[in-house]
Image (spheres, helix red, strand yellow):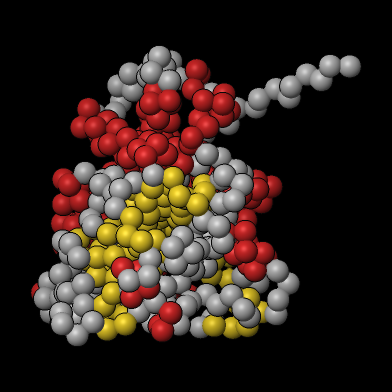
């Protein structure tokens, strides 16, 4: 008997979301259409009249760089299978700075494995196993595992310059060292130990205060009782976290749109989780502040971390699902920055506007800035604890195999034909 193909079940695209989060869906759908247009020039993009033309320009540039990555520079990550085996193997757990990691797969690499001091330039710290031992990748690139599935993307110049200038301006106003004598409160606190490498360190700058701002509508505060609450800088008005979130909302929407092309299952899963988070629940408190935060939230991600003047060391993230993609943006004014991923065997110029999107729970990675010019790094993540709380039955979506190079065959699941005029 002839087998009939299993009917394709499109992703759900109708969500009950606050107005700001509808922006995330709108930008993401536009990017999906724009990318499909690259794959199929006959594809007609709806007008998307609600998106200003200048924002469409930014989204189009982002999609264009992703497309270039899939067409111009394809690399392999032959060690990814070994990394997965070691990550999920039943080795004994040990504690490393409050992290539980596998005994033979530490959360951080020792300094001798990746970093030395370079005396000729003051404050210059580089990755010796990068420029001397790894190839420097300049252009857009996509990295695959042995089975041909993407694990990381290098996307230089993905974010436009004027967007970076706005990001820099708002962060500098929020974390201006010269204002500390008047108002010491700032959303940028000491580096979070749960995601800080023992080899990482902060450096000072005359104007820009160092530290990390953690923005999240909900994060786990009591594992035993399963209680969640917004991050502290959003809970207390003196930290001005809500103001910073409001000022960066458009930027977060554009950064978040990248995942709609690179891994649509994560994009829709993130929106579904935020939809659930917006519903009243006794496990999320205080609910009225969560509602206020979500009224400004514009990204499918559930966590943003912004690092000022921080050299990270080489590490693994511990907050995201194992096979989820993190989006890492370089900003600020420092032009002599490097990003390294030893598992890929490549180092990258981490110029402002560059995005690195990869499975950072599995892949070792890190960044450094040469000299002491202000450097800003923003990381957009899917918080694993929040995902397990809101969409426990759909966690598998983050490990779903999806390649933009196969968009034509996978596009029926996106249901792009359902968008007539958005």
Q: Position of residue 354 (x, y in %)?
A: 29, 52
Res 155 seen here: yes
Residue 18 is left or right of residue 247, and the answer is right
Foreground pick, 175 / 196 = 196
Instruction: Tell me if residue 284 can be seen.
Output: no
Q: Nearer the viewer, residue 53 or 135?
A: 135
Q: Position of residue 22 (x, y in %)?
A: 41, 35
Task: Name the residue rendered at 45%, 50% in the picture.
Answer: 75
Identify which residue, 360 or 276, lies in the foreground: 360
Q: Residue at position x 48%, y 36% from top?
A: 404
Q: Is residue 240 left or right of residue 121?
A: right
To which quarter of the image does residue 315 belong?
bottom left
| x 41%, y 17%: residue | 43
Q: Is residue 342 above or below residue 383?
A: below
Q: Position of residue 309 (x, y in %)?
A: 24, 72
Q: Quadrant of the N terminus?
A: top right
Across and down, in percent, residue 225 comes to 64, 68
Q: Where, by quadrant of the figure, is residue 282 drawn?
A: bottom right
Residue depicted at 33% across the width and 55% down the height = 137
Classify the position of the C terminus by image quarter.
Answer: top left
């Amino acid at each position: 008997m002839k087998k009939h193909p299993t009917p394709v079940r499109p992703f759900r695209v109708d969500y009950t979301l606050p107005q700001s989060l509808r922006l995330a869906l709108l930008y993401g759908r536009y990017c999906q259409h724009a990318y499909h247009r690259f794959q199929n020039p006959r594809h007609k993009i709806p007008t998307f009249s609600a998106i200003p033309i200048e924002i469409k320009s930014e989204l189009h540039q982002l999609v264009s760089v992703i497309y270039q990555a899939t067409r111009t520079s394809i690399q392999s990550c032959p060690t990814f299978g070994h990394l997965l085996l070691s990550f999920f193997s039943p080795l004994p757990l040990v504690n490393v700075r409050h992290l539980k990691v596998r005994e033979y797969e530490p959360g951080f690499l020792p300094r001798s494995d990746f970093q030395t001091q370079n005396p000729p330039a003051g404050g210059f710290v580089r990755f010796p196993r990068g420029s001397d031992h790894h190839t420097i990748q300049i252009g857009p690139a996509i990295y695959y595992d042995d089975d041909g599935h993407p694990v990381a993307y290098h996307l230089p110049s993905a974010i436009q310059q004027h967007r970076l200038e706005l990001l820099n301006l708002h962060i500098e106003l929020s974390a201006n060292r010269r204002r500390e004598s008047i108002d010491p409160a700032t959303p940028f606190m000491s580096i979070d130990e749960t995601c800080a490498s023992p080899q990482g360190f902060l450096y000072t700058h005359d104007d820009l205060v160092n530290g990390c701002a953690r923005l999240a509508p909900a994060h786990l505060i009591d594992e035993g009782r399963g209680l969640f609450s917004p991050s502290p800088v959003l809970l207390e008005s003196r930290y001005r976290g809500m103001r910073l979130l409001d000022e960066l909302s458009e930027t977060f929407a554009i950064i978040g749109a990248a995942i709609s092309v690179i891994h649509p299952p994560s994009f829709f899963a993130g929106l579904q989780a935020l939809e659930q988070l917006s519903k009243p629940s006794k496990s999320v408190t205080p609910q009225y502040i969560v509602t206020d935060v979500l009224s400004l939230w514009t990204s499918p991600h559930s966590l943003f971390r912004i690092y000022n003047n921080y050299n990270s060391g080489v590490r693994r993230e511990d907050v995201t699902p194992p096979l989820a993609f993190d989006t890492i943006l370089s900003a600020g004014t420092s032009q002599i920055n490097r990003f390294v991923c030893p598992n890929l065997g490549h180092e990258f110029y981490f110029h402002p506007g560059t995005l690195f999107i990869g499975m950072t729970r599995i892949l070792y990675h890190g960044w450094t800035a040469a000299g002491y010019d202000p450097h800003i790094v923003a990381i957009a993540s899917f918080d694993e604890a929040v995902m397990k709380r809101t969409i426990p039955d759909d966690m598998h979506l983050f490990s779903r195999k999806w390649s933009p190079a196969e968009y034509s065959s996978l596009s029926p699941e996106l249901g792009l034909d359902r968008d007539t005029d958005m």
